[in-house]
Image (cartoon, rainbow, N blue to C red):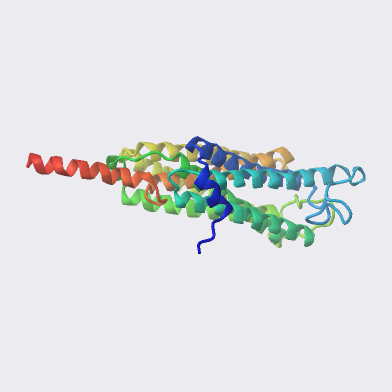
Amino acid sequence: MTIQTPLGWLADRYTLSPRSLRWAATASLVVSILIVVGGGIVRVTGSGLGCPTWPTCDTTSLAPTPAMGIHAVIEFSNRMLTVLLSITVAWTIIAARLQKPRVRSITRLAWSQFWLVVANAIAGGISVWTGLNPYVVAFHFLMAMGLLTTTTLTWHRVHEKPVSADAVRAITAPAKALSWVLVTLTAVLIAVGTLVSGSGPHSGDSADVPRMAFDWIDITIVHGVLGTVTLLVAIVLAVVLWRSRARTPLLRTVTYVAAVVVQAVVGLVQALTALPDALVVIHLLLAAMVWVGALRVLLDVNPGMLPGVHLAAARAEESVAAPETQTAA
């Protein structure tokens, strides 16, 4: 006897349009970026322990009380972003399941968002329980970037358009290899960025919070060198794509280059101006955008990476062209 799930029961009776799925995926992507920004605001305002317990704000109340002050309000507001994200992810899961025909790869991506929301919330709770241990906080940030990865992949999958066989052939092997190098360097760059934050002055709370045992100047220089190498790889990739006339991947790579340049300028200015709060938050926002950009470059340079309509369309085009060639012969 087969037991039907609630979503399966709904899918047998209702259908949602592809537009609904696209809106849901977009909402999840936007809110997952806001989660990164919200964490940055909590850090620079020193509100990380504004709610000293988790999942409640204190031992007696779920929400902050007036006596707890503005820091508790900021920290609790950041927690409420997770509630908003949970709603958008649930919307994405339901919209993906209620598509006709059902695309299992999209459903799996949507469910991966759910599990990463849960894992990220637990990581946030552990960071509070450990008094903002800098390594736990860094892990919490990387989990947020992992969530951003899944929302980006989902967004790309539900918005993708068929890619012609000519467009696929225009992407050379060196371009594909460089795209993987680029996304790997970007991931390492972001990871090293957590070491910069973990050893810098913004501990996340006004209390005496321990910091990572790195020299802030040295690790910042390493971060800057990695950023320069990443930018150079992106420029080389853009040249390779330009020579092969791969238009969409080229546009995506040029956009990534522009984002990295802006990020580098912001990072340099904040390092030279004693890390003003606003620039730190902007830097985190740009870090999220750069990561999204790196993933989009990877996906566009490797159109067969995610199961979808692109390669199927290319094969169909080739199968149509083959009989014509044989007839002409």
- Between 301 and 199, the one lying in front of the other is 301
Residue found at x 93% / y 45%: 67
Judging depth in this view, the residue of 241 and 311 nearest the camera is 311
Looking at this view, name the residue that lies furthest to the left: 329
Query: Residue 162, image x and y in percent?
Result: 36, 40
The location of residue 321, given as percent across then percent down, is 19, 41
Residue furthest out toward the front: 1
Closest to the observer: 88 or 15?
15
The reply, left or right, for residue 81 in relation to residue 27 is right
Quadrant hosting residue 24: top right
Left or right: residue 166 versus residue 16 is: left
User: Relative to 125, is 260 on the left or the right?
Assistant: left
22 or 302, nearer to the observer: 22
> Residue at the spot x=8%, y=39% of the render?
328
Q: Is residue 170 visible?
A: no
Q: Quadrant of residue 56?
A: bottom right
Percent across and percent down for residue 14 are: 52, 42
Q: Is residue 230 visible?
A: yes
> In percent of the image, x 48 and y 43: which residue is there?
99
Q: Is residue 284 above or below residue 54?
A: above
